[in-house]
Image: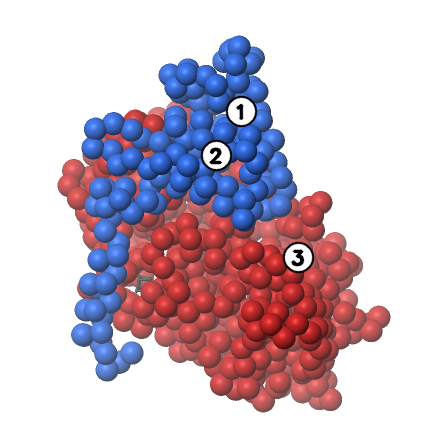
Chain colours: A red, B blue
Amino acid sequence: MLSTFDQIAAEGRDVTVDADVVVVGSGAGGGAIAAELAEGGRSVIVIEEGGHYTSKEFGLDAPTMIKKLYRNAGSAPILGKPNIIFSEGRCVGGSTVINGAMSWRTPDKVLKRWQWEHGLDDMTPEKLDPFFTKVEERVSVGPQDPESIGEDARIMQRGADKLGYAWVPAMRSQKHCCGANNCAFGCPTDAKQSVLVTYVPRLLAAGGRLYSGCKIDRVTTDGQRATGVTGRFRHPVTGKRGPKLTVRAKVTVIACGAVQTPVLLLRNGLTNSSRQVGKNFLCHPNSKVVGVFDKPIHAWKGTIQGNQIREFIDEGIMITTSMVPPGLLAMSFPYFGAQSWDVMRDYDKMLAAGCLVEDTGSGTVGVDLFGEAKMRYDINDRDFNNLIRGVALTSEILFASGARRVLMPFDFLPSIDSPDQIASLFKHPIPKDEVECLTVHAMGTCRMGVDKRSSVVDPRGESWDVPGLFVADASVFPGPIGVNPQITIMALATRTGRWLLDNEARYFA
Amino acid sequence: MSALGPWSRRVVGALAEVVLPVGDGVPPVATHAIVDFVADYVPHMPRLLALLFPVGLMMLELGAFFLAPSLVPFSAMSLARRRRYVDGWVHARWRLRRDLIKAVKGLCLLAYYSDARVGAKLGYTVESHVADVSAERLRRHAQHI
Ligand SMILES: Cc1cc2nc3c(=O)[nH]c(=O)nc-3n(C[C@H](O)[C@H](O)[C@H](O)COP(=O)(O)OP(=O)(O)OC[C@H]3O[C@@H](n4cnc5c(N)ncnc54)[C@H](O)[C@@H]3O)c2cc1C
Ligand code: SF4
């Protein structure tokens, strides 16, 4: 059963409910673990701060949808050198409702690192295979229908082929995606198999309950074990206050994402004996490079990513297309007035590509004056050099595929007109704070490990300090993964759910 | 929902006049629509940023006295002077100035280029594209979805 802010506010009474499990957050991790537990016979309540929207409400006006579906309308800054703009979802289905649906298993080399560096011996491809297989089936991971691939992906592919760079076709969670390219503002056709249209219906069909428009601000304990959560209903857009919610549960799962989970735990002063909550903040910093071609290529048509260039993945660089509507593109350029129009009039001839860097450094998530997230991340020299190299490689591919001009993500070198100029990126050092950087992959802030002195949760996702308190989102990653994370998050959350079901006597007696 | 008072709205309006493209064949969008857009956007920002937003506008407005330098605040300067002044912020050495102008200018441009008429002029006919591909999807795959 789904209860929204409007329904609860109309009743006007505080709500107190009991369940075996309460899950806070309905995104990649929360959705997957909630459905796993509900289908396993447990009574499950999911609480989501954002609103519940269906594909009928997913309009094509980007700013309107950003205000509805994104936390802070996508404008949260991660402070550092450079500042990085961070976007995450805040709606039923979490960031999966606005993500690109790219779906990959955790690379083997990453799992090896997690075994060697963090002692997570169970993190082998073989042992995780059943969870990956289940998740891939649940969210329909597969290749795109050819007609959904846009010209941008084909152009990048031609450029990569010319240079001999390896690429892989996109694997996405979708059913006959038709290339509407509105993924970031909610898929209007329901082709994208986000948590909203996969795990949430499964949860509800299995008797689970979901409250939307309710922000949890307290995790309750009996002095030892977690006993549930309390929060307040708030209108997801206007912020109008509604009744209070109290959930009493045998198991409490926090799945608010790798930025909001540490904020909630830090505000509650919980599970931080290791002092690692909010530390090890990883974000795959990335930058956008735009190629301008001689004729219209309609890069805004076709699925958001049709392929990924993987030639440099072992160096920690991944390159792909990421076209956005004109408003979002124009705001990222240093131009204004007549100059802005001069550039933007070629919008239909533009191809936006992004290069993502697997971080070797990390940042922190803390709590600001208002109890909101305070993010800090100074990109280290190695990752910064990788980012610049990524920008150079992306420019090279764009020129090889026929671009006549490339718009760069730098304040003081806005564009180059020939591949010969790429070398100039390395001649004069580019100050870190002059690079336009963004991210949509937050990870690592409540990391999993075998040593309670250096990790927040154990290898199953349970808090070292507070029994019955679990974390099941991107926070638990012990390190970066270098590829899009949703399948890893869902698989680890499913694994935690399975652990709870297999240990009923311990948790639910 | 608006977090901007009349004073802040005036500064945003003065900036929008500089930032928005004008000229032959460039679709016009009313300045007040841009100001409304920005005013509606600010409350969605992180609380600290939303509170600092008017402070940033004040820096832009009053900074004109010593940065331009000018005898009048930014919003009272001629359009040509405002343009030069904003250009100084975009290319400032001090990063805070660059970041601040990036944010406010960015919102104005987001509002402008998100206008459907502007999008259509750029060839971004997203409504008809989505309608076409959605219909085609149903035609091809109705039995599988
Ligand atoms: C634009 C964009 C594109 C992306 N593209 C891809 C892609 O192609 N492939 C991929 O693998 N990944 C992609 N990602 C990343 C991926 O979607 C996220 O990493 C993933 O969804 C994170 O899962 P999560 O469970 O950690 O958090 P989320 O999915 O963000 O879910 C957290 C949920 O918790 C809720 N919440 C937070 N605090 C509270 C609280 N106090 N009370 C109640 N509820 C709360 C939030 O509102 C949110 O709905 C993208 C992300 C974005 C933003
Ligand atoms: S490209 Fe379009 S149809 Fe495909 S998933 Fe994204 S929004 Fe949906």
What separation in Å lies between label 3 and label 2 (alpha carbons)? 30 Å
Q: Label 2: chain?
A: B
Circle 3: is it few (<14), some (14-19), or many (20+) Cα within 10 Å? many
Residue labelled with disc 3: A262
Pointers 1 and 2 in contact (CB under 8 A)?
yes
Q: In the figure, is residue B9 to the left or right of A392? A: right
Disc 1 element: helix
Q: In the figure, is residue A355 to the left or right of B89? A: left
Circle 1: is it few (<14), some (14-19), or many (20+) Cα within 10 Å? many
Residue A97 visible in the snapshot:
yes
Residue placed most toward the observer, B144 or A167: B144
Rendered location of residue B11, percent (x, y): 50, 28
Residue placed most toward the observer, A504 or B131: B131
Residue labelled with disc 2: B104
Residue A255 visible in the snapshot:
no
Instruction: Farthest residue to the right: give it.
Output: A223
Q: What residue type is labelled 3?
A: Pro
Disc 2 element: helix
- Which residue is depicted at the point 16% across and 38% down? A294
Q: Of tags 1 and 3, which is closer to the observer?
A: 1
What separation in Å lies between label 1 and label 3 (alpha carbons)? 35 Å
Residue labelled with disc 1: B60
Q: Which amino acid does label 1 sit on?
A: Leu
